[in-house]
Image (tube, rainbow, N blue to C red):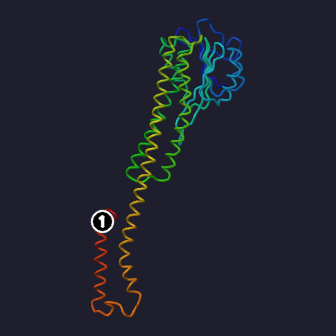
Amino acid sequence: MSVMAAYAYKNGARARAVSLDGPDGLKLEPDEFVWIGIVEPDPDELAKLQARFGLHPLAVEDALKAHQSPKLEIYGDQLFVVAKTAHLGEVRIEYGETDIFVGENHIITVRHGSARAHTQLRSQLEASPGLLKKGVDYVLHAILDFVVDGYLPIVESMEEEVLAMERRALDTFMSRGEVNRLFHLKRDLMRFKRVLAPMGEVCSRLEHLDTPCLDADVRPYFRDVYDHVRRVEGMTDALRDVITSVFDVSNLFEQQRQSAITRKLAAWAAILAVPTAVAGIYGMNFQHMPELHWRFGYPLVLAAIAAVCAVLYVRFKRSNWL
């Protein structure tokens, strides 16, 4: 069985465990609600829940496939919420999915590929009976808040890595591996942004949604989750700008390095052109050339070449070409 936890709650406290097996396993009293957590379910398990709680077939199909973007669907007096979970793997952001069925007396979470279990979340809620007794709508808020809180460490970790690369880019030239890493980070952030936008829309709709399974007193709590999504979204946009600036700084330094090398080559070429030109002239081997038979001609030419080269070297040095 993939059922991780299934408990009935009454007046903000855990009343008893419930079971998917047997005809009486999911019977609830009028003032009770049940919270069932399932991981990677098989069709039979969802079929039992569908038959007991009247889950919509389209929602059940989406929960089995688990390839949905964040969304909110309304089926009569029930809600179906798809939340995208995320965690930072070794080289990229990896995604999971949490599908949530919400009714007046039940909330069912179906997790796929999520790296964070709901055990700690359930314990925190059970430690706050005043909030838990608000019912399934507050549990829905807590689950979405739990999912969104998992986004912040991802962006903070990526931000530290990018800022470290930015500092290195100011001191030395970036390697090909670092450039590739920045490119992959930017691509991951673009994909992450495509998750954040619909998650924010889901939270915003829940804030203003009027359904029997959501109390008006709890709706403002979803605004807090929406604010968290907006905060992460802003950090993601800022981090993408930082990555772009690192690329620009790296390209600027590379251009400066190439320009400095070009200037040095041009300066040394100009200096070497002097002895090359003089040697070329005197290497023509004409019989009647000035100073050709003069006793001091050779040392004078060498001295003149050295003097001109020295003057050129000093001028280029002062111009920061060498």
Q: Amino acid at mark 1?
A: Lys
Location of residue 102 by image quarter:
top right
5 w.r.t. 237: above or below: above
35 sits left or right of 303 in the view: right
Q: Which residue position is annotated with label 1?
A: 317
In the rendered view of the protein, which quadrant contains the N terminus? top right
- The secondary element bearing badge 1 is classed as helix
Q: Quarter of the image holding residue 245?
A: top left
Q: Which residue is pictured at 40% across the width and 83% down the height?
A: 280
**Relative to residue 149, is residue 109 drawn left or right?**
right
**99 is higher (above) or lower (below) than 92:** above
**Position in image of residue 229 (x %, y %):** 49, 27
Q: Position of residue 135 (x, y in %)?
A: 55, 12
Give the residue drawn at x 68%, y 29%. Answer: 65
Label 1, residues with CA under 10 Å away: few <14, some 14-19, many ≥20: few
Q: Residue furthest top?
A: 30
Q: The C terminus lies in which quarter of the figure?
A: bottom left
Spot occupied by residue 254 in the image (x, y as percentages of width and height): 43, 55
Compared with 203, 293 (above or below) is below
Identity of the residue drawn at 56% across and 15% down: 209
The residue lying toward the viewer, choosing from 6 and 144, is 144
- Left/right of residue 203 with respect to residue 55 in the rendered view: left
Image coordinates for residue 275, horizontal then vertical, percent: 36, 79
**Who is closer to the viewer here, 102 or 258?**
258
Residue sitting at 47 percent across and 33 percent down?
153
Report the label total. 1
